[in-house]
């Protein structure tokens, strides 16, 4: 078997690099992406490694780049992405990059601070402008109605001190009362400011309670929202003016304003002073607008220049960081001039890796060539399955169950066919399959552009990653839809129905409860491909016929799928030279499955071939036995019930004897699977103890079936330590019980193919009958409008329910059939994935891949 059907052969190598050439060589290996380094300093703290300072410098550069990226995204500036990956910079170039990033960050922070200060000044002047305008309205109202309003307003402005003295104030004009030397404390005054609109009700209540109603508040909303200079959010504020008397109330009012974060501004009492201040404020606002515009233009130019190189800078910094992080995994020799590394490499790519090391040495100018030595080890190597953009998604489905053990049979190539086919058996509909296939084909045709539009939408990434699976599932569903002759719950009469009406036509059309039999109603050969479209109009027996057909093909496909899984285990046993498992596990398992369940499948074909509606007894449809009852009688050794008159008890000669023999042989396979392997292991250990020789290798061969090809690695999970005999017996018992009972339950589990196919067809028919047919029955111009609306609703339900939801359900059921029913027959999935040092993977996954 080639590498398509098994993981790549791996080798553990030791790498010697001169210190001056190590950076360039690791850089070349990162571009190649075929080497997985091991950590030779597992007990050394991350902060005590040799290149920790360089890694910290890279972290600092990444922080600065993320800051620049945030500012660029805030302004909505597009970042140039050519799709090219620049080479890793030389170590001496780190200083230039650091200086560039430092300059950009400082310049941008200075610009932002200046812009924030200008915006804060602009906000204050804008608020002051609104205060001057709104308060002018207040004072104008006051001047126009002095006699009516001042008395009521000043009646409340009696301070606690005045109330204690028993004094009372007469009517006064707020803000315009002349100073009195005797009662200066009682002179009315005011403060003006702005406050967030949502805080205004609580602010009013607090003023009323704290000042005991001895204040007068007027407020007006600022119609246009103002920009918060701190975060750039739009906020709504209101202008307020508070009238009061006395220093005590003044202190209270200011403390309350401070607590509610209201901003107070000076507001002159004289109208002329207010007009003069307003003119000065407008002049300053115009000047600030000019300066702010220039500041924003300068900031924009800085960010545009940075956006052109940001992607390349990120790539360069992450490559440098990845190289130094990898160098921290190496060991230094005693002379401090040579770095030593250990790595897993694919055996077929050793020459390519040596060429990359040679290029790195030449780039660094070193005269000492690197040394790559292959080491002998009994460790289990990582599993590396080569994939391309087509097979990657199918391999991901297998790895989600568990990464294959080293050199174990890889189910992914077979899954490329079996997965979409079993999905299509449940999803078979020509119309729905076409929608799915077209969606997958669109993603395939546009894959370059869609891949370049990197997004964090997880659902879209799943769809795009499985575009080839979606396309194949759609194509296979179109095929099964043709077999079922089902398109949106209707049939295609391509070749013309081969069934004709042999009864009186008027009698058939007038009797709704008459069930037509297919006996004698077919002209010549059956329908050439798939179902005859006449079954679409069959009423009472349509679902009965479809159920019987789909139920049987589900069992047939299931048994064949499981047998194929058992045969795959033969490839594993022969490759790993596991003779005991081959003789006492594979052969009994295959015999057990063939003699019971494959025999049941043969009975289905015999029944289809031998019995027909057009035949006379004893081979008519009335004489056809039930396969399920026949199988139950076979397993329980029951005598079949007497058949109807002129019918035969058995389908072929010697059936009873063959069935008894098959059951006995199948039952006899169970103790072989249960006891043979543990007893042989126990015998081998006993002989080893009698001979008193270190033959642990032979015992291991008895347990695991020998060593892997090449002898350097234990393939298929070689045991470093011998298991206890009790554990071997327990594990073998569990394995045998699981297989025997699982053969029954797994066979029944494939009936989900029939169940979901039936549910999908019935849902499609319900949508057609209860939704689209309503629009098709309408006539006239109104009917066209109704049909358009109904069709849109039907299309939404079809795509949303039948394609997406039913498709997801069928996908999950197909996944379960592969993981449990198929892979459990041969696939252990106890390996660990090969994770090479690759710049492409690091850049794709971000800096998190470096830390891992």
Image (cartoon, rainbow, N blue to C red):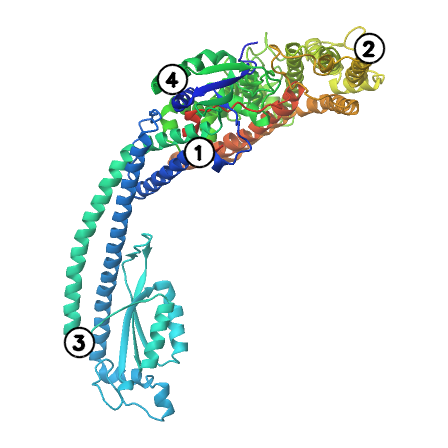
Q: Earlier in the sequence, mark 4 or mark 3?
A: 3
**Mark 4 neighbour class, 10 Å CA radius: few under 14, some 14 to 19, many 20 or more:** many
Q: Secondary structure at mark 3?
A: loop
Q: Earlier in the sequence, mark 4 or mark 1?
A: 4
Q: Decide: is 260 above or below 746.
A: below
Q: Where is mark 2, residue-wise?
A: 661
**Percent x, y of residue 710:** 60, 10
Q: Nearer the viewer, residue 666 or 764?
A: 666
Let me know if residue 76 appears in the view. no
Q: Residue at x 68, y 13 (%)?
A: 613
Q: Residue at x 23, y 55 (%)?
A: 118
Residue positioned most to the front? 335
Dots 3, 2 in contact, CB < 8 A:
no
Q: Secondary structure at mark 2?
A: helix
Which mark is on residue 791? 1
Q: Earlier in the sequence, mark 3 or mark 2?
A: 3
Q: Earlier in the sequence, mark 3 or mark 1?
A: 3
Task: Name the quadrant containing residue 88.
Answer: top left
Which mark is on residue 361? 4
Q: Secondary structure at mark 1?
A: helix
Q: Decide: is 455 above or below 546.
A: below
Q: Is residue 18 left or right of residue 712?
A: left
Q: Secondary structure at mark 4?
A: helix
**Percent x, y of residue 246:** 31, 82
Q: Nearer the viewer, residue 790 or 763?
A: 763
| Pair 2/4: label in front | 4
Q: Where is mark 3, residue-wise?
A: 270
Query: Label 4, label 3: how many angstroms apart (C-alpha)?
Result: 85 Å
**Mark 2 neighbour class, 10 Å CA radius: few under 14, some 14 to 19, many 20 or more:** few
């Amino acid at each position: 078997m080639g590498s398509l059907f098994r993981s790549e052969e791996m080798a553990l190598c030791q790498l010697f690099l001169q210190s001056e050439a190590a950076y360039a060589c690791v850089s070349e290996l990162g571009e190649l992406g075929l080497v997985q380094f091991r950590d030779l300093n597992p007990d050394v703290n991350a902060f005590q490694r040799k290149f920790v300072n360089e890694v910290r410098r890279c972290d600092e550069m990444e922080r600065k780049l993320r800051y620049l990226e945030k500012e660029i995204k805030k302004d909505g500036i597009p970042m140039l992405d050519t799709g090219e990956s620049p080479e890793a910079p030389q170590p001496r170039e780190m200083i230039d990059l650091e200086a560039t990033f430092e300059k950009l960050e400082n310049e941008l922070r200075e610009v932002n601070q200046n812009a924030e200060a200008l915006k804060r000044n602009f906000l204050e002047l804008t608020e002051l402008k609104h205060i001057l305008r709104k308060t002018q309205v207040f004072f104008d109202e006051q001047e126009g109605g002095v006699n009516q309003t001042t008395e009521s307003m000043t009646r409340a402005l009696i301070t606690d001190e005045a109330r204690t003295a028993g004094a009372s104030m007469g009517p006064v004009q707020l803000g315009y009362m002349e100073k009195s030397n005797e009662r200066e404390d009682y002179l009315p005054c005011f403060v003006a400011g702005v406050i967030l609109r949502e805080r205004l009700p609580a602010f009013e209540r607090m003023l009323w309670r704290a000042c005991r109603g001895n204040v007068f508040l007027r407020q007006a909303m600022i119609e246009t929202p103002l920009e918060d200079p701190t975060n750039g959010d739009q906020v709504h504020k209101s202008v307020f003016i508070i009238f009061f008397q006395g220093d005590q109330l003044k202190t209270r009012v200011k403390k309350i304003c401070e607590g509610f974060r209201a901003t107070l501004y000076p507001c002159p009492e004289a109208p002329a002073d207010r007009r003069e201040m307003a003119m000065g404020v407008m002049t300053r606002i115009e000047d600030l607008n000019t300066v702010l515009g220039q500041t924003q233009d300068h900031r924009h130019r800085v960010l545009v220049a940075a956006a052109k190189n940001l992607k390349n800078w990120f790539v360069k910094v992450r490559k440098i960081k990845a190289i130094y992080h990898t160098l921290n995994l190496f060991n230094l020799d005693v002379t401090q001039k040579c770095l030593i590394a250990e790595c897993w490499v694919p055996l077929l790519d050793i020459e390519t890796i040596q060429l990359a090391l040679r290029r790195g040495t030449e780039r660094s100018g070193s005269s000492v060539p690197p040394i790559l030595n292959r080491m002998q080890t009994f460790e289990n190597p990582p599993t590396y399955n080569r994939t391309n953009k087509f097979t990657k998604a199918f391999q991901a489905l297998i790895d989600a169950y568990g990464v294959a053990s080293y050199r174990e049979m890889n189910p992914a190539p077979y899954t490329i066919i079996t997965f979409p086919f079993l999905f299509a058996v449940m999803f078979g509909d020509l119309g729905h399959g076409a929608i799915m296939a077209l969606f997958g084909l669109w993603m395939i045709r546009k894959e370059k552009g869609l891949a370049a539009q990197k997004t964090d939408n997880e659902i879209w990434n799943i769809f795009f990653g499985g575009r080839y699976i979606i396309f194949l599932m759609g194509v296979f569903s179109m095929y099964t839809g043709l077999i079922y002759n089902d398109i949106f719950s209707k049939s295609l009469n391509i070749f013309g129905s081969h069934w004709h009406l042999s009864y009186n036509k008027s009698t058939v059309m007038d009797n709704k409860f008459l069930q037509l039999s297919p006996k004698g109603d077919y002209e010549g050969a059956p329908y050439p491909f798939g179902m005859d479209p006449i079954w679409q109009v069959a009423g009472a027996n349509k679902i009965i016929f479809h159920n019987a057909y789909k139920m049987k093909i589900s069992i047939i496909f299931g048994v064949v799928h499981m047998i194929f899984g058992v045969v795959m285990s033969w490839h594993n046993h022969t490759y790993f030279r596991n003779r005991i498992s081959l003789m006492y596990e594979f052969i009994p398992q295959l015999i057990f499955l063939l003699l019971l369940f494959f025999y049941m499948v043969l009975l289905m074909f015999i029944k289809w071939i031998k019995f027909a509606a057009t035949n006379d007894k004893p081979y008519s449809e009335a004489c056809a036995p039930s396969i399920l009852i026949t199988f139950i009688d076979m397993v329980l050794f029951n005598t079949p019930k007497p058949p109807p008159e002129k019918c035969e008890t058995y389908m072929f000669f010697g059936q009873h004897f063959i069935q008894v023999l098959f059951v006995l042989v199948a039952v006899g396979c169970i103790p072989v699977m249960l006891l043979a392997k543990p007893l042989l292991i126990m015998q081998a250990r006993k002989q080893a103890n009698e001979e008193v020789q270190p033959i642990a290798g032979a015992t291991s061969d008895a347990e695991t079936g020998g060593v892997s090809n090449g002898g350097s690695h234990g393939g298929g999970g070689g045991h470093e330590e011998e298991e206890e005999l009790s554990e071997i017996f327990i594990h073998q018992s569990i394995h045998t019980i699981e297989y025997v009972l699982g053969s029954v339950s797994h066979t029944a589990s494939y009936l989900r193919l029939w169940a979901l196919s039936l549910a999908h067809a019935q849902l499609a028919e319900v949508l057609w009958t209860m939704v689209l047919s309503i629009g098709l029955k309408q006539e006239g111009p109104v009917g066209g409008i109704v049909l358009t609306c109904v069709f849109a609703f039907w299309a939404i339900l079809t795509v949303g329910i039948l394609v997406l939801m039913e498709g997801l359900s069928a996908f999950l059921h197909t996944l379960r059939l592969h993981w449990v029913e198929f892979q459990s027959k041969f696939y252990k999935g106890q390996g660990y994935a090969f994770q090479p040092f690759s710049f492409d993977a690091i850049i794709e996954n971000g800096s998190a891949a470096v830390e891992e």
